[in-house]
């Protein structure tokens, strides 16, 4: 298109052996664009190349198609999410209940802070065709496993400490995640709704099967 050249940033060419740096820059740029647009359809090889400041064909050295870029973006987002959950747990101290609550609120906080990424991660907006793209079914199936495992382990710790009565921590962790996702999604979809200030606790407490309101 006629405006591609005018909007392309001037970029210093990477030195030999710095291809990994360009790949990282492409993924970071695509994630920023996703946050801005809130729509993965805004992420194209051409638009990302223009924002990075390289010719579109240069991207093919790192990503064969748009779904490959999106997979990298989503993988990074899940890594960010899991790191946020880990940090929240560590800050909560040693009490199992407090650590589980921290994981839940860390999840909700991530969704609020990164709505574009969150919708793509969990909102069903990004559904790559594994038959026509470079993305394989197993690439998608493993996304988010670390965070789900962290949630399940936090709930299992509560059971071991006697502050939760779950008899199947993994399945109950899945149910808890569904509750968290529902709240996160609806908060993004209806930001002007007058949400009760304790709405998160109303969802978390029963789904976590806590024995009492105390730590």
Image (cartoon, rainbow, N blue to C red):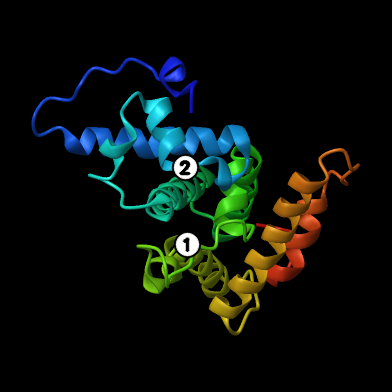
Across and down, in percent, residue 46 comes to 42, 36
Name the residue located 38 percent from the left edge and 40 percent from the top edge.
Answer: 27
Residues under numbered marks 1 and 2 in contact, where contact means CB atoms less than 8 Å apart: no
Q: Is residue 201 above or below residue 178?
A: above
Q: Is residue 104 above or below residue 41?
A: below
- Of mark 1 and mark 2, the one earlier in the sequence is 2
Relative side of 168 to 76, left or right:
right
Which quarter shows the C terminus? bottom right
Name the residue located 15 percent from the left edge and 32 percent from the top edge.
Answer: 18
Relative side of 41 to 66, left or right:
right
In three-dimensional space, the C-alpha distance between marks 1 and 2, rounded to whole angstroms, equals 24 Å
Relative side of 88 to 66, left or right:
right
Where does label 2 land, which residue?
Answer: 44
**Which numbered disc, 1 or 2, marks the residue closer to the eye?**
2
* Residue extending furthest toward the left: 16
Q: What SS does tag 1 mark?
A: loop
> Which labelled disc corresponds to residue 144?
1
* Residue extending furthest toward the bottom: 167
Across and down, in percent, residue 63 comes to 31, 48
Q: Is residue 204 above or below residue 80?
A: below
Name the residue located 37 percent from the left edge and 69 percent from the top edge.
Answer: 136
Q: Quadrant of residue 48?
A: top left
Across and down, in percent, residue 56 comes to 34, 35
Does residue 102 appear in this view? no
* Residue extending furthest toward the right: 194
119 or 192, which is in the foreground? Answer: 119
Does residue 127 appear in this view? yes
Q: What SS does tag 2 mark?
A: loop
Across and down, in percent, residue 33 comes to 52, 34
> Which labelled disc corresponds to residue 3?
none
């Amino acid at each position: 298109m006629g405006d591609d050249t005018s909007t392309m940033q001037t970029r210093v060419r990477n030195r030999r052996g710095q291809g990994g740096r360009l790949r990282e820059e492409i993924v970071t740029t695509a994630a920023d664009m996703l946050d801005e647009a809130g729509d993965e359809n805004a992420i194209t090889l051409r638009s990302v190349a223009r924002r990075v400041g390289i010719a579109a064909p240069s991207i093919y050295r790192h990503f064969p198609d748009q779904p490959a870029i999106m997979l990298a973006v989503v993988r990074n987002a899940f890594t960010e999410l899991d790191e946020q959950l880990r940090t929240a747990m560590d800050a909560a101290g040693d009490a199992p209940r407090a650590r589980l609550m921290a994981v839940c609120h860390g999840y909700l906080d991530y969704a609020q802070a990164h709505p574009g990424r969150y919708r793509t991660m969990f909102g069903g907006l990004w559904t790559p065709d594994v038959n026509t793209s470079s993305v394989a079914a197993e690439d998608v199936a493993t996304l988010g496993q670390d965070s789900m495992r962290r949630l399940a382990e936090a709930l299992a710790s509560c059971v071991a400490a006697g502050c939760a009565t779950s008899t199947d921590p993994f399945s109950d962790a899945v149910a808890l995640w569904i509750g968290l996702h529902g709240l996160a999604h609806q908060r993004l979809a209806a930001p002007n709704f007058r949400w009760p200030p304790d709405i998160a606790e109303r969802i978390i407490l029963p789904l976590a099967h806590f024995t009492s309101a105390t730590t």
